[in-house]
Image (cartoon, coloured by chain):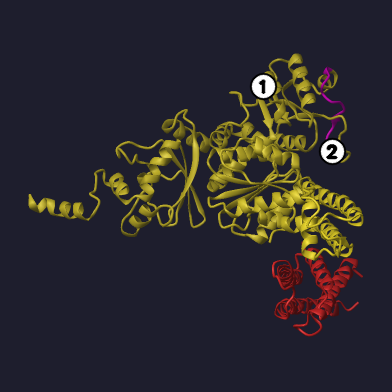
Chain colours: A red, B yellow
Amino acid sequence: MNIEKVVFAFFIVLAATLNLGFVYGDIDEPAHHEVYELFAAVVVNLIVTVLKFGDRTHIGAVHLATSLVAVLQLVAASLVWAYAISAGAQGLQPGTIAGIVSLSVGALLANAVSITLLVSETIQLRR
Amino acid sequence: MSSAIFIALRRLRAPIIVLILVYAVGMLGMVLIPGRDAEGDPWHMGFFHAFYFISYTAPTIGFGEIPYPFTDAQRLWTTAVIYMSVMGWAYAIASVLALRGDQAFLAALHMQRFAREVRRLAEPFYVVCGFGETGTLICEALDRTRLRVVVVEIDPGRVAEVDLQGFSATVPALTGDARLPGNLLLAGIAHASCRGVLAMTDDDNANLAVAIAVRLLNPSIPVLARSRSGETTANMASFGTDCIINPFTLFGEYLSLLLRAPRVYQLLDRLVGSAASPEIADRAPPRGHWIVCGYGRFGREVVASFDRERVDLTIIDPDPPADSERAVIRGLGTEAEPLRAAGIDAAVGIVAGTDDDVNNLSIAVTARQLKPELYVIVRQNHTANNPLFAAYGADFTVVSRALIAEHCIALVRTPLLGRFIARIKAGDEATGEQMLAQIEQKIGDKKITAWNIALASTSAAAIDRALLTADVAVDALLRDSTRCERLLDAVPLLLVREGKEMLLPQGDFPLQRGDQLLFAGTNESRELQLATLVNSNVLDYVMRGRDIPGGWVWERLARRGPTAG
């Protein structure tokens, strides 16, 4: 067992679950989307990205790429959120939350790719 | 991506994760802890404000408590955040700085730079493995003749020396084991401009490994390897190493030559010798009774060459090998007693050949005190002792490292010279006499260089073209391309045609395409000859003794000339 791989798997799965938890619910209903969950998803995705630094295998590089995609999507979603509640006068509108959630769904896809890679890598291990 | 970046990213992983966690925990705390707005109503900070606040608190900038003054609970948390974040940043910065001192990172950077320098080499270059005394001498000599060098050396201290040598061109140097094929490939043995590899490390096994690696990875380039033992030599020869140089054997051969055919030796010395060559006294070693001090590898070669020439000798050694069938007098030879026992009163010469410079000098001084007219051969192990040996002034000082170096340089620069040397070593005194006479008549005391030319379309375009239609003799290559009645200061020493060798080709000897020739002469004449080789007009001029018009118009005019009047 490689403890580094296990820690990495933990964070990858956590990133995906948090992301899914945030996305889950009606797309334009602000009450269904918890800001704390988005925050946690951003933080965990950042950690996943850094954990993949310095892996010179091909699969490691692909992992890094997918994590970067997820981080970009989630950061974009958070920026939209921050802009909506600070600069927008009316607070969170259904249209805005729909935009935020759809960005996060993109991140979820990237995280799903990460999990697929992880699972295929683990199956190949056979021990 | 290069490995230096990977190492840096790997080292920085922990500090970056710590920073992310510090920021996340700090932000979360700021969001959760309730504050009060201007009216005193409960208020919660948003994530955006929390990030803004942490961002200016963490690097200790501190804009203050915004948008509303903090409550005590918020201030308590802020205090904790300040300490956490400062430590997080300190850790991150310290990690970046530590990277500068990280050996693995520096080694990766060094290797990357080396590989880039070698990849970009466009000129022909040689790979020298081992930057010891021999390697240094070789690199210096190659650099002086404007040839590029790449060095592979295992000792980082020696690699640092490369920068201090003051080479005229950049010499890429790799700190690494030459036995590893990866390092050799990095050094460019498979590079298109690589002209040869010189394995000059102090370790026979390493030299062997280099030789075999080059033979397998790039069979088209020559390998010159240094060897100290007969087994290594045989092993290297078994897979076709182009040239194996054993310093002791080399000296043994020189010594035989000196005894048997001093003129041939003199010829060799003029062709091969460089600034590094040992001073040879005018007199040749006399025949008679000799004393050899030190019966190690050097001593054995000396004894073997004396035996070949049937010279009577006595050996002095403090610890003779058990398998020796010769009578050996025990002792160092540094005192008078063993020297007298070896019969110094009747001796004509002495060889001080131990592997200790101080002992060798001591033997030589003692011997001269006992018998001033003795012919003294001293072995010098380290170039650092040059002043001592110069002050002593032996009849013959053997510097084995310099010996290898100049031999290598000569062979690297002029591959035909190796064949020539092998040929005349076996030859007799008369051949040497004849060649020396020619050289002295044509070149005199001027400095000699040896060079070879190949009559191929690339290196000698003019001759190659002329040979298709007409006969060209060796003589054409010996004429001054500015005044054709004058002969160059050059002697053709060897002609190789289809693997057959011919010594001293005559001036009227007809050339053929594909011939290879070895010349000895001054540098100036070499350049004049180059013009004849590549320029058809110059070749016509030296062959016919008059200027032939070049260019279409002048050619037409010249053809018309006679009819027009």
Quarter of the image where one finds residue B515: bottom left
Does the magenta run of residues contain B329? Answer: yes
Name which residue lies at 62% across and 40% down: B139
Subunit ID for the residue under disc 2: B
Q: Residue furthest front?
A: B39
Image coordinates for residue B496, horizontal then vertical, percent:
49, 52
Disc number lying in front (1 or 2) = 1
B399 lies left or right of B263: right
B479 lies left or right of A109: left
Name the residue tied to disc 2. Answer: B325
Name which residue lies at 59% across and 59% down: B220
Q: Is residue B54 visible?
A: yes
Q: Which of B317 and B458 is in front in this view?
A: B458
What amino acid type is highlighted by mark number 1? Ala
Q: Is residue B236 visible?
A: no
Name the residue tied to disc 1. Answer: B390
Does the magenta run of residues contain B24? Answer: no
Image coordinates for residue B22, horizontal then vertical, percent:
85, 58
Q: Which of B281 and B433 is in front in this view?
A: B281
Name which residue lies at 78% across and 66% down: A49
What's drawn in magenta, residue-wise?
Answer: B325-336
